[in-house]
C-alpha cells in the first residue's frame, strides 16, 4: 500500500503501470528500452483534494521517497516518538526497539514509525528534521512526521533525530533499532494440550514456545496451520495431508515450524493412540449429473461404520481439499455417515476415501469419480444507463436484456462498476418484461446529488468501550466529511462489515458518530486489515491498523478490540473441579437440561472473564453451520458461565440434544479468540457421559416421489406425491417451493403430519401431496405448457434436525457457498429428474400471451419518512390488469426499496380483490432504522404474471413515467434522540441480565418490564449507557414471555418501542428411565393398521371462556390451558404436594395434603384439644381384571389381578409384577406396572407422542406379555376402577360430588376422567394409543359404570370403571396413563356433570377435600390417604370403618 498527504491527512493512493498506454516517448525524454536499458511509466492516482502546499523542503521530498519504500516493503509499526524543541542542546534520550521480519521469506526488518514535534512555531518555520522524514500534518502545537528504516537481520542501527527552526532552537531524540530473528536454539517448548481430535479443530495441539515473543515472525509449517493465541501460545491445526499420509501411527507427532529460512524449530507433541477400529460397510454413492449449483445439493457418499470407538476419523479427498463425513443416524457400533463433496471443477473429479485402521494409520478404502456438469447461459446484454437528477432526487436507472434462458439463478451484477459493490438478486427483482426465454431488466437506485460537487475532505476518529456482557464491546467511529460519509467498511477474517446510516447515533453524515456492537471473540482484534471510509462521491480513505489517524491524539490507533487475557492465564493447567448436575444421562428420545460446574486455581484471573460454553458434538456443529473443511468458520451459540461467589465456582446451564452419538458429550470453553479449551484434552473424570439407544441427527428424507397428472387428480391440477420418512425422531413440519420454468410462477406448500394423505401413515412415514392448479374458475384463458420444478425444500424433525434443498443458492449462500457442505439433501436418494414435472401442449395448449400485465395505479401512504422515528411503516396500494389472458392466481408481486448503498427491503404483497382481468394488491412494510438516509430510496414493483406465460415489473423510472408519486421516498429526517430497541440477547427462565441493542439509549434512565401476570416493574437504569447498547439487570425468574420498554424521566418523556422477550426454559427434573420402558420408535405400520385418531373440535367452556386470557386460550379443538391451569374450561389448578411414600406391598400411595383448618399429621388432636379431629380421605385406583372379548365386544373370560411383587427402582419410581394363568391354556401372562412420581414439570415420550407431566403427578407404565387368545377375532380389555371417597356425613354436610369422562382439548388426543368432591379433584389421562407388537396403534377407552358393580355414589363418594380395549396381538402390549391432583375454582354443584348433592348446596372452601391418584395403572392398586383437618361429629369414625371395608373388598 502507498500513502500520500491529502489535505493534511494520511490517505492511501493507488499506483498503476502505464507502459501500454503511453505513446509520447520522445516528448517525455525517455530512453529506448533494449537489452541494457528498461523504462516504465507509473501513475500515482491521488484522490480529490481541496488544499495544496508549495515549496516542499528537502526533508519532505526525502520523506515522500522513504514513505514509498516503506509501504512497498514490510511494515512494523512502532510507537510515536516525541521530539521537543529546546533552546539548548540536551543529551539524547535513547530508545531501543527490537524488530523481527514480518514473514519468514524476508531477510530484513521494516520499521515505520512516527515522530511528533512539539512546536513553538508553525511547521513552516521548522527548518529541518534529520534524518529526512515524511511530513504528515500539523496543528498550532504539533507537527507529525513519519520515518522508515529497514535493517538486515542481525543489524543494529542508532539514529539521532534532530529538529531545528533556524533560530538555533533544537530538539533531538536517540533511537536504536535492532533487527533479529527468532533463535530456535534458545526456545523451549511446553505442551499445553497433546494431540487430540475434536470435531471443530480436527487433530490439534497447543504449545507454548518460550522465547518467542508475540510480536515476532509468525511461524509457518507445511503440514499445519497455526493460531497465535497470545502469551507465546499457539494452537497447531494438523492438516489432513499430514495425519492421513505422513504420521499415521506414531505416538509422537513432529512438525517443523519455520520462523525464517535459517531458523526452523521442530515441535514434537504426544499423540495417544486410539482403540482398534472396525471397517466400514454398505457404501452408497448418490450422483446427480446436472448443473454445478444443483450438484452442491445432489451428490453424496453414505456408508455405515462398525467402529467401536466414538469418534472414528474418515476423510474424503479431492486434492488439495478434504471433506469430513459426519454421522447422521444409526445405533452405537453401527453408525451411518454422510459426506457431501463439493464440485471444485467442471467435468470429472476424482475422490479418494480414507478410513482409520487398527494401528491408527489410514487406508484408502475406495475411489470415486463425480462428473459435475454445467450449462452456460448467454450473458446479460450491455446496459444502458440513464440519470434522473431532478431538484428533489437523483437516481440512475440501468436497463438491459436479460438471459436468453433464465433458470432461477441468483444473479450478481456490478453494472461495470457503476455501483460500489456487487448486487445480488433473483426473480422477480429487476424483471420488467418477457418470460424466462426472453426478458428485459430495469433497476433504479439513488445517487448522491453531491456527485457533481468538487470538495472532499476527511477527519476521522475511533474509540471503543467495554460492555459488561458476554464477549461484546462498543466501537465508536467519529468522522466528518464535506460531502457526507456514505459508510465505513472493514473486512476481518473474511467477514465483511459495513457501517452505514443504520449505525449513525449522533450528528449527521457530514459530522457524526457511528456506533456498533463488536464481538470480541468471533471477530476479535484485527491488526492486519484496514478500515475504509467512503463518502458520497464514492471516494475512499483507508486507515491502516496500528498507525495514528489523529494528530491531537497520536497514541490512538485504528484497531478493532478483542478479549485480552492476562499473561499468567493458563486455563488448561488451572481448570479443576468439573462436575455436572446430571451425568451418565439417557438422551434417548428426550432432550435433557443440565448444569456444568467448574472452577480454577488462580481464580482471580478468571472471576471477571466472560467464559463461553458451547457443545461441539456433531448435531450442534451442524445446527450452528460450522465450516471445518476449508477454513475454520464457526460461530457457536455460547452459553455464558456465571460466577457463584458463595460456592466459589462457575456454573453454566445447557441443553443436551436428544438421540445423538452416545459416549462422551463434547464441549468447549472459550476465553478469547483462538483461546478455546476442548473437553477431549481433559481426563476422564471431567467428562460428561451420555447414553442413547438411537442416533438421529439428520432431518427427514424423501424416500419416494410419484408424479401426478391431471387424470390422477380428476381436476386441472398436477403435482407430486412425496413419501417422507424419519424413523426415529419423526417428521415435524416443512415446506416445498415449486416454480414454473417459463413464467417463474411460485407455489409454496407448508406440510406437517396433519396435512399428510389420510390413512397413509404417521409422522415416522407418510405421504404428502403437492398439488399445483393449472387454472382456476376466474381463468378463462387456459394454461401454457411449461415445466414445474421443485426448487426448494425444508424438512424438520421433532428434535430440530433439518434437511434443506435449494436448486439454486440463495443470496446468503452465494456469498458463502461452502456453508452447504454438511447439508443433507432430502432428495438425495432420488434422481434429479423426479423433481421436474413437465406439462406439455397435450394438457395445456394455450398460446403465449406476449402482452404482459400492466400497472393501473400505484400509491403510498407517505412519501417522506423520519427513519429515526418509531412510526416507520409505509403501506403501498396498487392495481394491475391483463385484459388478454388475465392475472395468474396466487402470484404475489413484490415491492423493493433500494438505497444508494444497494441495500434493499422486500415486501411481498397480498391480494385484496381479484377479477378475471384485474387484481388489487396491498403491502405494508416497516422501514429499517436509518435506511436510505439522507438521500432517500427508490421504489419499484415486480412480479406481475399473466395466464399466458409473461410477466412484467416496474422500476422507479417506469413508476415515475406513469404519473405515480410513490416512486421515491425521501428520508431527510433522521431523529437521533428517539429510543428504538432493535434486538436483545437471550435470557433463561432463571432470570438475570439482558443486553439490548438499538439506538437513542444515551438519555434513557428507566426500564419498564411487564411480566405475564400484568405486573409492571419500573426500575432505574444502572451502569453505563451507550447510544447503541444497554444492559438491563435484575430480570426476575419467569417461564412466560415479558415485555421491555425504555423511557426517560425528563420532559418531554420519550418512550421506546415495546419488545417481547421469551425466556429459554430450563427444567432440571431429569430422572433415569425405567429399564423396562418400551421403545417409542415403531417400525413402519402395516397397511391394515388404522391411523391414530385425533379428538374432534369442541366448544370452549367457562365464564369467562377458558378461564380468561391468563388461564387459557380458545382454539378450534377447545380450551388449551396455560400452566398451572387445567381441565376442559381451565378452571382447575394443579395442586403440588410433597412426594408420597412408596408402598412396598402393592402399588398404592399415601399422600398427605394440608387442610384448610389446621391440624397435625396424625389422626388425633394430640396435645392440642382445640384442634378439630382429622378425617381420612382415600382414593383407590386399581386394576380390577383382564377380560377377553369376543368379536361382538362381549366378555368371555375374566381374570382378576390381585397378587403383586415389589421392586424399588429409585426414590420416585417403583415396579410391581404379577403372573396370571389362563384357564385351559398352558401359557403364563406377565403384567408389569411401573409407577413414577414427578415433582416438577417434565417432558416424556410414549408411543412417539411427547407428553408434559405436571408437578405432583403420577405416570403408570403397564406392560402385558403375549396373551393366549381363544380366537384371532378376539380382543383384550383391561378393566380399571377409580374411586374417590371422603369421610363426610351425607346428611349433615352441604357438599356435592361429580364425575366426568370425555376427550381432552389440549392437543394430546386422549380421554380423561375427573372425579371431584367439593373443590378437589383427581384427573386421569388415558392415551388413545398403545404400543402393540412394537407398533403404535389406536386403542379405545370406554366407561363401564353401567355394567360393573360400583359402590353407591353419594356426596362423599364417586367411583368409575374404565375399560381399555386392546386389539388382538401376538407378543406384547404397553400402556401409559397418568394422573394429576387438582384444586377447582368452582366447587362441584348441582350443575356439574353427573353430580350428587346434599340438600344444601356447597360448604365453604376447604371444609371437604378429596383427592385421588388416577386411573389405568394397570396391574396396580393404589390407595391414597389424604389427611385434612375438618370439624366433624363422631359419625365420622363409623363412616371411616365402613369405607375401609369397602376398600378392602376391592383389594
Image (cartoon, rainbow, N blue to C red):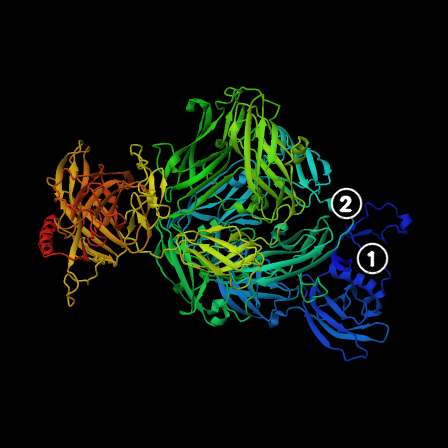
The residue that label 2 is drawn on is 452
Of residues 255 and 460, which is closer to you in this image?
A: 460
Asked if 936 appears above or below 85 in the picture, the reply is above
| 651 or 694: nearer the viewer | 651
Q: Is residue 1390 left or right of residue 470?
A: left
> Can residue 317 be seen here?
yes
Residue 336 appears at what percent x and percent y? 42, 46
Image quarter (top left, top right, bottom left or bottom right) of the N terminus: bottom right
* Position in image of residue 586 (x %, y %): 34, 54
**Which is in the foreground here, disc 2 or disc 1?**
2
Crowdedness of circle 1 by 10 Å Cα count: few (<14), some, many (20+)? few
Residue 628 visible within the image? no
Tell me which corner region of the image, top left, top right, bottom left or bottom right, holds residue 134: bottom right
* Residue 64 - label: none
- Above or below, comparing residue 170 to residue 1227 in the picture: below
Marks 2/1: CA distance?
A: 21 Å
Q: Nearer the viewer, residue 1124 or 1311?
A: 1124
Disc 2 residue crowd, few under 14, some 14–19, many 20+, Cα 10 Å: few
Left or right for 201, reference 1436: right
Say what secondary structure mark 1 lies in. Answer: loop
Q: What kind of element bears circle 2?
A: helix
* Mark identifier at residue 52: 1
Amino acid at each position: 500500500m502507498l500513502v500520500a498527504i491529502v489535505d493534511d491527512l494520511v490517505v492511501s493512493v493507488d499506483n498503476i503501470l502505464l507502459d501500454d498506454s503511453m505513446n509520447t516517448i520522445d516528448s517525455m525524454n525517455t530512453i529506448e528500452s533494449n537489452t541494457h536499458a528498461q523504462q516504465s511509466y507509473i501513475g500515482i492516482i491521488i484522490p480529490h483534494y481541496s488544499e495544496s502546499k508549495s515549496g516542499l523542503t528537502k526533508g519532505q521530498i526525502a520523506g515522500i521517497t522513504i514513505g514509498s519504500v516503506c509501504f512497498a516493503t514490510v511494515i512494523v509499526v512502532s510507537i510515536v516518538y516525541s521530539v521537543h524543541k529546546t533552546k539548548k542542546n540536551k543529551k539524547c534520550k535513547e530508545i531501543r526497539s527490537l524488530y523481527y521480519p514480518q514473514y519468514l521469506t524476508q531477510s530484513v526488518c521494516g520499521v515505520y514509525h512516527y515522530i511528533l514535534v512539539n512546536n513553538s512555531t508553525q511547521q513552516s518555520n521548522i527548518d529541518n528534521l534529520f534524518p529526512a522524514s515524511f511530513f504528515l500534518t500539523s496543528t498550532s502545537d504539533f507537527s507529525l512526521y513519519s520515518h522508515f528504516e529497514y535493517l538486515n537481520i542481525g543489524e543494529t542501527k542508532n539514529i539521532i533525530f534532530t529538529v531545528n527552526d533556524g533560530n538555533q532552537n533544537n530538539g533531538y531524540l536517540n533511537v536504536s533499532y535492532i533487527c533479529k530473528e527468532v533463535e530456535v536454539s534458545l526456545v523451549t517448548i511446553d505442551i499445553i494440550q497433546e494431540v487430540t481430535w475434536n470435531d471443530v479443530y480436527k487433530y490439534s495441539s497447543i504449545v507454548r514456545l518460550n522465547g518467542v515473543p508475540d510480536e515476532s515472525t509468525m511461524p509457518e509449517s507445511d503440514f499445519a496451520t497455526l493460531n497465535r493465541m497470545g502469551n507465546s501460545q499457539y494452537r497447531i491445526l494438523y492438516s489432513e495431508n499430514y495425519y492421513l499420509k505422513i504420521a499415521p501411527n506414531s505416538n509422537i507427532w513432529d512438525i517443523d515450524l519455520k520462523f525464517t529460512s535459517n531458523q526452523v524449530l521442530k515441535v514434537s507433541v504426544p499423540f495417544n493412540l486410539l482403540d482398534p477400529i472396525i471397517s466400514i460397510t454398505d457404501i452408497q454413492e448418490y450422483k446427480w449429473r446436472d448443473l454445478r449449483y444443483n450438484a452442491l445439493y445432489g451428490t453424496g457418499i453414505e456408508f455405515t461404520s462398525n467402529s467401536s470407538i466414538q469418534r472414528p476419523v474418515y476423510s474424503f479427498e479431492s486434492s488439495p481439499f478434504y471433506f469430513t463425513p459426519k454421522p447422521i443416524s444409526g445405533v452405537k457400533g453401527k453408525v451411518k455417515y454422510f459426506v457431501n463433496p463439493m464440485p471444485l471443477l467442471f467435468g470429472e473429479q476424482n475422490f479418494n476415501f480414507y478410513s482409520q485402521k487398527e494401528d491408527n494409520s489410514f487406508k484408502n478404502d475406495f475411489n470415486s469419480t463425480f462428473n459435475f456438469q454445467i450449462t452456460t447461459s448467454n450473458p446479460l446484454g450491455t446496459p444502458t444507463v440513464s440519470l434522473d437528477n431532478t431538484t428533489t432526487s437523483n437516481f440512475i436507472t440501468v436497463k438491459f436484456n436479460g438471459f436468453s434462458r433464465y433458470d432461477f439463478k441468483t444473479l450478481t451484477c456490478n453494472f461495470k462498476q457503476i455501483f460500489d459493490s456487487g448486487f445480488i438478486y433473483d426473480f422477480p427483482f429487476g424483471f420488467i418484461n418477457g418470460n424466462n426465454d426472453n426478458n428485459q431488466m430495469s433497476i433504479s437506485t439513488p445517487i448522491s446529488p453531491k456527485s457533481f460537487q468538487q470538495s472532499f475532505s476527511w477527519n476521522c476518529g475511533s474509540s471503543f468501550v467495554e460492555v459488561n456482557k458476554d464477549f461484546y464491546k462498543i466501537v465508536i467511529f467519529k468522522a466528518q466529511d464535506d460531502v457526507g460519509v456514505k459508510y465505513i467498511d472493514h473486512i476481518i477474517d473474511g467477514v465483511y462489515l459495513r457501517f452505514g446510516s443504520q449505525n449513525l447515533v449522533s450528528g449527521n453524515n457530514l459530522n457524526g458518530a457511528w456506533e456498533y456492537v463488536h464481538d470480541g471473540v468471533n471477530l476479535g482484534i484485527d491488526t492486519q486489515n484496514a478500515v475504509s471510509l467512503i463518502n458520497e462521491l464514492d471516494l475512499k480513505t483507508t486507515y491502516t491498523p496500528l498507525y495514528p489517524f489523529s494528530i491531537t491524539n497520536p497514541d490512538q490507533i485504528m484497531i478493532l478490540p478483542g478479549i485480552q487475557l492476562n499473561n499468567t492465564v493458563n486455563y488448561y493447567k488451572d481448570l479443576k473441579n468439573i462436575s455436572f448436575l446430571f451425568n451418565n444421562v439417557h438422551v434417548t428420545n428426550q432432550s435433557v437440561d443440565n448444569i456444568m460446574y467448574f472452577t480454577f486455581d488462580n481464580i482471580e484471573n478468571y472471576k471477571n472473564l466472560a467464559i463461553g460454553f458451547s457443545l461441539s458434538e456433531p448435531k450442534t456443529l451442524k445446527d450452528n453451520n460450522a465450516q471445518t473443511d476449508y477454513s475454520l468458520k464457526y460461530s457457536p451459540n455460547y452459553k455464558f458461565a456465571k460466577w457463584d461467589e458463595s460456592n466459589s465456582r462457575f456454573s453454566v446451564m445447557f441443553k443436551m440434544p436428544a438421540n445423538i452419538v452416545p459416549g462422551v458429550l463434547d464441549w468447549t470453553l472459550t476465553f478469547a479468540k483462538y483461546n478455546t479449551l476442548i473437553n477431549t484434552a481433559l481426563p476422564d473424570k471431567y467428562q460428561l457421559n451420555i447414553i442413547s439407544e438411537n442416533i438421529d441427527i439428520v432431518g427427514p428424507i424423501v424416500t419416494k416421489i410419484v408424479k401426478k397428472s391431471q387424470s390422477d387428480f380428476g381436476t386441472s391440477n398436477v403435482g407430486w406425491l412425496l413419501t417422507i420418512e424419519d424413523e426415529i425422531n419423526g417428521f415435524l413440519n416443512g415446506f416445498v417451493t415449486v416454480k414454473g420454468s417459463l413464467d417463474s410462477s411460485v407455489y409454496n406448500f407448508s406440510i406437517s403430519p396433519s396435512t399428510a394423505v389420510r390413512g397413509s401413515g404417521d409422522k415416522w412415514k407418510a405421504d404428502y401431496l403437492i398439488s399445483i392448479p393449472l387454472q382456476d374458475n376466474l381463468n378463462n384463458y387456459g394454461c401454457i405448457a411449461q415445466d414445474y420444478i421443485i426448487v426448494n425444500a425444508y424438512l424438520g424433525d421433532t428434535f430440530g434436525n433439518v434437511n434443506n434443498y435449494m436448486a439454486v443458492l440463495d443470496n446468503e449462500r452465494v456469498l458463502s457457498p461452502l456453508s452447504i457442505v454438511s447439508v443433507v439433501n432430502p432428495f438425495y436418494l432420488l434422481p434429479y429428474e423426479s423433481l421436474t414435472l413437465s406439462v406439455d401442449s397435450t394438457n395445456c395448449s394455450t398460446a403465449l400471451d406476449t402482452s404482459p400485465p400492466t400497472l393501473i395505479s400505484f400509491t403510498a401512504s407517505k412519501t417522506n419518512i423520519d427513519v429515526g422515528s418509531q412510526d416507520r411503516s409505509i403501506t403501498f396500494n396498487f392495481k394491475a390488469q391483463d385484459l388478454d389472458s388475465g392475472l395468474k392466481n396466487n402470484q404475489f408481486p413484490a415491492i423493493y426499496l433500494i438505497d444508494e448503498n444497494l441495500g434493499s427491503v422486500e415486501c411481498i404483497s397480498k391480494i385484496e380483490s381479484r377479477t378475471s382481468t384485474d387484481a388489487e394488491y396491498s403491502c405494508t412494510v416497516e422501514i429499517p432504522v436509518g435506511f436510505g438516509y439522507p438521500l432517500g430510496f427508490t421504489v419499484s414493483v415486480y412480479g406481475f404474471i399473466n395466464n399466458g406465460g409473461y410477466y412484467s415489473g416496474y422500476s422507479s423510472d417506469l413508476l415515475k413515467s406513469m404519473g405515480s408519486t410513490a416512486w421515491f421516498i425521501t428520508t431527510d429526517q433522521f431523529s437521533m434522540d428517539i429510543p428504538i430497541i432493535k434486538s436483545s440477547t437471550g435470557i433463561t427462565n432463571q432470570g438475570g441480565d439482558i443486553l439490548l441493542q438499538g439506538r437513542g439509549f444515551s438519555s434513557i434512565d428507566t426500564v419498564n418490564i411487564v411480566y405475564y401476570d400484568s405486573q409492571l416493574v419500573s426500575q432505574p437504569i444502572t451502569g453505563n449507557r451507550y447510544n447503541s447498547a444497554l444492559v438491563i439487570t435484575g430480570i426476575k425468574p419467569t417461564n412466560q414471555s415479558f415485555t421491555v420498554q425504555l423511557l426517560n424521566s425528563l420532559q418531554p418523556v420519550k418512550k421506546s418501542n415495546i419488545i417481547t422477550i421469551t425466556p429459554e426454559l430450563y427444567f432440571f427434573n431429569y430422572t433415569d428411565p425405567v429399564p423396562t420402558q418400551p421403545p417409542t420408535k415403531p417400525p413402519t405400520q402395516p397397511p391394515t393398521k388404522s391411523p391414530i385418531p385425533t379428538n374432534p373440535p369442541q366448544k370452549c367452556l367457562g365464564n369467562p371462556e377458558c378461564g380468561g386470557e391468563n388461564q387459557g386460550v380458545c382454539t378450534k379443538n377447545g380450551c388449551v390451558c396455560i400452566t398451572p391451569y387445567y381441565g376442559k374450561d381451565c378452571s382447575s389448578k394443579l395442586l403440588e404436594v410433597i412426594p408420597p411414600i412408596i408402598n412396598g406391598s402393592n402399588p398404592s400411595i399415601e399422600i398427605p395434603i394440608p387442610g384448610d383448618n389446621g391440624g397435625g399429621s396424625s389422626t388425633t388432636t394430640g396435645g392440642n384439644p382445640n384442634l378439630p379431629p382429622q378425617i381420612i380421605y382415600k382414593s383407590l385406583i386399581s386394576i380390577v381384571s383382564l377380560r377377553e372379548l369376543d368379536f361382538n365386544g362381549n366378555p368371555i373370560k375374566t381374570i382378576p389381578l390381585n397378587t403383586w411383587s415389589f421392586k424399588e427402582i429409585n426414590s420416585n419410581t417403583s415396579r410391581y409384577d404379577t403372573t396370571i394363568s389362563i384357564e385351559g391354556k398352558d401359557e403364563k401372562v406377565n403384567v408389569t406396572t411401573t409407577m413414577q412420581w414427578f415433582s416438577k414439570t417434565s417432558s416424556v415420550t410414549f408411543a412417539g407422542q411427547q407428553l408434559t407431566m405436571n408437578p405432583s403427578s403420577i405416570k403408570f407404565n403397564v406392560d402385558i406379555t403375549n396373551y393366549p387368545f381363544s380366537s384371532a377375532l378376539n380382543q383384550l380389555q383391561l378393566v380399571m376402577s377409580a374411586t374417590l371417597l371422603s369421610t363426610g356425613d351425607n346428611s349433615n354436610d352441604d357438599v356435592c360430588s361429580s364425575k366426568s369422562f370425555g376427550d381432552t382439548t389440549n392437543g394430546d388426543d386422549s380421554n380423561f376422567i375427573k372425579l371431584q368432591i367439593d373443590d378437589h379433584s383427581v384427573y386421569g389421562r388415558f392415551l388413545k394409543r398403545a404400543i402393540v407388537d412394537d407398533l403404535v396403534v389406536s386403542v379405545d377407552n370406554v366407561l363401564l359404570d353401567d355394567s360393573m358393580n360400583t359402590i353407591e355414589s353419594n356426596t362423599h363418594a364417586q367411583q368409575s370403571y374404565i375399560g381399555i380395549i386392546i386389539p388382538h396381538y401376538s407378543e406384547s402390549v404397553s400402556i401409559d396413563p397418568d394422573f394429576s391432583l387438582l384444586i377447582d375454582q368452582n366447587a362441584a354443584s348441582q350443575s356439574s356433570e353427573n353430580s350428587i348433592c346434599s340438600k344444601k348446596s356447597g360448604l365453604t372452601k376447604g371444609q371437604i377435600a378429596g383427592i385421588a391418584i388416577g386411573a389405568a395403572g394397570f396391574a396396580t392398586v393404589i390407595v391414597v390417604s389424604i389427611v385434612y383437618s375438618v370439624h366433624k361429629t363422631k359419625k365420622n369414625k363409623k363412616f371411616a370403618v365402613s369405607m375401609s371395608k369397602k376398600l378392602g373388598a376391592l383389594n
